[in-house]
Amino acid sequence: MQHLLTNLLLIISFTVSAQTKSIQQSSPLENAKPESVGMSSERLARIDAMCQEAIEDNEVPGMVALVARKGKIVYHKAFGTADALGRELGKDAIFRIASQTKAITATAVMMLWEEGLFRLDDPISKYIPEFKNPQLLKSFRYEDTTYTTEPANKEITIRHLLTHTSGLGYGMIDGDERFKMIYQKAGVIDLFTTENISIEQSVKRLAKLPLHHHPGEDYTYSEGLDVLGYFVEIMSGQPFDEFLREHLFDPLGMNDTWFYLPNEKAGRLVAVQQSNNGRWEDLPTTFYDPDYPIKGEKRFFSGGAGLSSTAKDYATFLQMYLNGGELNGVRILSRTTVQSMMGNQIKDFWEGSGRHYGLAFGVLDQEGQDQGGQGSVGTFDWGGYFNTQYFADPQEELIGILMKQTRNQSSDDTGWKFRILVNQAVDD
């Protein structure tokens, strides 16, 4: 017991300084005229026309668009409505960012890694013993969902979890029906929940389930970042939500980013909507309750999909990365760590796609740049289950964020159009 207490105190002594003061002193994001940072106001106005046309054509009910360059917000507008009752959408609207949570969780992992607490190629079973001796799915009976397994040829590492190469799956949104059935039967939580369950409980259930493939030998989008949310709790000695609040959100001023919204912010949450015979309606409860950020037991801190945020808060997070890990005199990550995180971590699994995957983001390569409309080499990006998108271009010091909240829409071209329109507005 004394040994465990000593270890816990040691961990706490490390994590109280997970973020530090920096000799760099970049400014927090603030508004500026586009021309002051080499952007054209006239060309940015093309975004207005695109957004308005998309709403008129019923592609989406509403959206918030933000563009920043060289640390200055040069475009930040809201269009359309926030729910089926026609509530006007505001620039400070809060959106479920779903898989955009993954980059935030990866950042927390790397903050702890910088303290020398673990290696990225450590087996996760060293810290979560339930993952010891992983098994591959060998055979499956659809009649009763029973299955057989065979041993994997290696342990799952922290790096595998960060890069979706662990072999874990994603339950109800998995591309393999067998894994949907296995995960559901085991009670593994996908995305988020209003139920009375913790991330620890779900992760330990997940640890007992078979893998898609041998760790490190393929790319399968997975709940690996949920596992790492629980891992952050173990390594920091703090609940995951508290760690993020204390060491990332508060230092960066991300005051509107939460797993579960405080009561005073709940009214700014945008409803998830779907189109029904040409009319937008609020999404009903399916395998998840879309109102999870404002009701339920509020115990499940999903590292892969659980956060809600605003366009400005997420732009602040991305600006920290464009600054090499620092914002407003706060050092979150070293520039050298950011450099490693943007490197190709998945071998040739995405060969020919114009992108590779790092430790938190998809990253554009030369082929991707040459295809046009996506940004410069090194542009990093991702999106979320409820139709949110973002990108950040280090060469152009450019950020684009487009926030929407829809499911089951028949068509929506706003994502790729927005990216082109942001890049074409560069005028220097």
Image: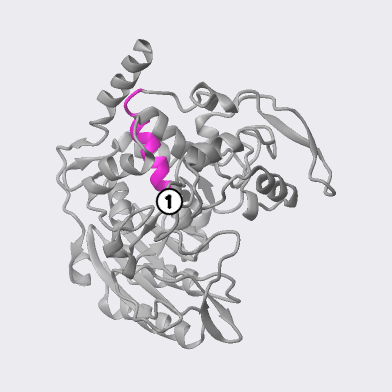
Please state which of residues 181 and 42 is positioned toward the viewer in this rendering: 181
User: Colour scheme used in the picture?
Assistant: one colour
Q: Write the residue at 34% across / 58% down.
A: 261
In the image, farthest residue toward the top: 2
Mark 1 element type? helix
- Residue 243 picture location, percent across and down: 32, 39
Residue 347 is left or right of residue 396, and the answer is right
- Identify the amino acid type marked 1: Thr
Please state which of residues 324 and 365 is positioned toward the viewer in this rendering: 324
Q: Write the residue at 68% across / 53% down.
A: 175
- Residue 411 picture location, percent across and down: 58, 76
- Residue 71 picture location, percent across and down: 23, 57
Quadrant of res 105: top left
Decide whether the magenta segment is chiefly helix, strand or loop.
helix
Quadrant of res 277: bottom right
Residue 112 within the magenta-colored segment of the rendering: yes
- Which quarter of the rendered picture does the N terminus lie within? top left
Please state which of residues 97 and 306 is positioned toward the viewer in this rendering: 306
The mark total stands at: 1
Residue matched to label 1: 101
- Which quarter of the rendered picture does the C terminus lie within? bottom left
Above or below for 252 versus 97: above
Above or below for 367 versus 126: below
Residue 60 within the magenta-colored segment of the rendering: no
- Residue 224 picture location, percent across and down: 54, 40
Above or below for 165 versus 234: below
Please report the bounds of the magenta region as a residue range: 103-116
Q: Write the residue at 50% across / 23% down.
A: 122
Residue 103 is left or right of residue 68, and the answer is right
